[in-house]
Image (cartoon, rainbow, N blue to C red):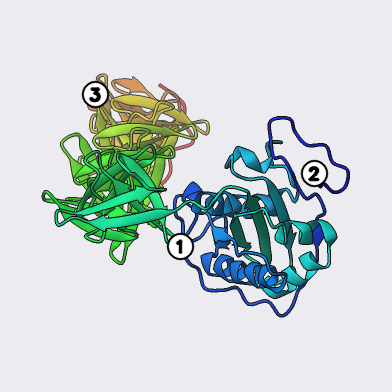
Amino acid sequence: MRTSCNSPLKSNGIKRIILILLVIVLTVGFVPAVNGSYADAYSGNVGYAGGYFSYDNANYMLTLVNEQRELYGLSTLDMDYEMLDAAMIRAFECTQYFSHYRPDGSDPSSLCSKIYSENISWGRDAAGTMSGWMASAPHRDNILDPDYKSIGIGSYITSDGSPYWVLVFSYESAYNIAWEYDGDGWICYENGVKVKSKWINDGGERYYIKSNGYMAANEWAKDSNGWRWMSSSGKVTRSKWIKRGGEWYYLGSDGYMTVNAWVKDSKGWMWMDNDGHITKSKWIKYNDYWYYLKETGYMAVSEWIVGSKGSCYVNAKGRMLSSKWLKYEDEWYYFKSNGYMNTSEWLKYKNEWYYFDADGHMVSEEWVSYKTFKIWMDADGIMARSCWVKDNGIWYYVDDKGYMMTDAWLKYHARWYYLMSDGSMSIGWNTIDGKDYYFDSSGRMERNKWIDDCYVKSNGAKAVDEYTPDGIYVGADGKSVVYWSPDGQVYHARKDCTALKGSGTVNEGTISESGMQELCSLCCGGN
């Protein structure tokens, strides 16, 4: 029994393993061969993990192996398809862990019990690799062992073009397949035994033999990984749409019916459900995101989805917006955590309040009614609070809750203002609680001042039937009562003012009627 590196054999594993690792790094001169079919253990993928399996390379290496055996007068080796699959797996495993042991610590016989020994290499093309093996005694001994009857060859090309090679040898005869057509269909024999209810490999293709012994054709066949469609020639259909029973199905590159997965064509993405059917007019959740499949079966992108519960929007990736803002055609919208657009409702966002109308538009520069109150939404859509609001040239004030103040006094920057029943700021004369007040053009209440022949006191109220601080009497209507001589220069608070004595005519009326600008200094302050 030959081994190298004095590596012990596992008691339950391979009987002879060549542990000389022929590592020859060749960075130029290698052109990967065109892919053939692919190892069943990797579901027949055309590519795997960024690289690919090459059956053409494996078949060429078989020619080189048998050329060497014929030079030494030995019988040629037959490719065993079970060991071929195992060798392909080993070639890929060597890209991850270059050893005669598998990444899980088991030996190659765990893949196929027929395997007795193994050669591995990487970095050179087929001819270069063969030259290296023939120059290494342990590897050469495997290739030229006269007792070996079959071989499996693996070839995996990485994404950067590096080739990995594996040869596995067996004393058992190669796996042999024979076919017979009896007029009703094809019958398969494996080592002379009629096959039933079994998948088989032949010529790099997968076939299914049914329980009646006939090859499946133009029908579905299932294994542990899923359903496959067997073509009229019995081969697995790959990378193709098929329509059966009014439903469309997609067969992936591995030949399996696509289920619970996305499929893309030139028009967009589709979701294949658990039965392999195209999902239509339905929401699905995938990787924590919601997507909508339209009645055509294609995933909606950058569009509105309107349903009985409300409206949603999906972005350019097809994902439903959730707890997000959207500006669409110059209008702002907000979508709640369940994906539905806010409509006729409030939103508190980063400690600010927003309101959305029945169409989902964020309201801005507009009043919103809330219970018995009105609330102003500013240009940014934020609810105004504790500030003045100018709307259509009229001033209003909203309190700290955002409510429009009505029928209420407001002290603002040490001045008093009054908000009327419609919320507008009072300007000019206004009767409040039975008293008259005057507010200037800025809405400020006037005090201690004559206005329109009336006097407003320190509390802002118009004086009525009383004397003002300068001694002028105001009547029940609040109007001033003064006296003056037609040829005089001042008006008087008292008719009996000594300055009026000797005047022929004494007139009585309001200050403005007197036409005078100043009060008599003699009667000023008297009463």
Three-letter code, disc 3: Lys
Find disc 3 in the rendering and name its residue. Answer: 371
Find disc 2 in the rendering and name its residue. Answer: 1
Asked whether 448 or 39 is in front, the reply is: 39
Q: Earlier in the sequence, mark 2 or mark 3?
A: 2
Cβ atoms at labels 1 and 3 below 8 Å apart: no
Q: Nearer the viewer, mark 2 or mark 1?
A: 2
Residue at the extreme front of the image, as rendered: 73
Q: Position of residue 17 (x, y in %)?
A: 75, 46
Asked whether 66 or 384 is in front, the reply is: 66
Residue 27 found in image quarter: bottom right
Q: Position of residue 144 (x, y in %)?
A: 72, 61
Q: Earlier in the sequence, mark 2 or mark 1?
A: 2
Is residue 68 positioned above or below 397 on the image? below
Find disc 1 in the rendering and name its residue. Answer: 37
Crowding at dot 3, Cα within 10 Å, few <14 / some 14-19 / many 20+, comes out as few
Q: Is residue 394 visible?
A: no
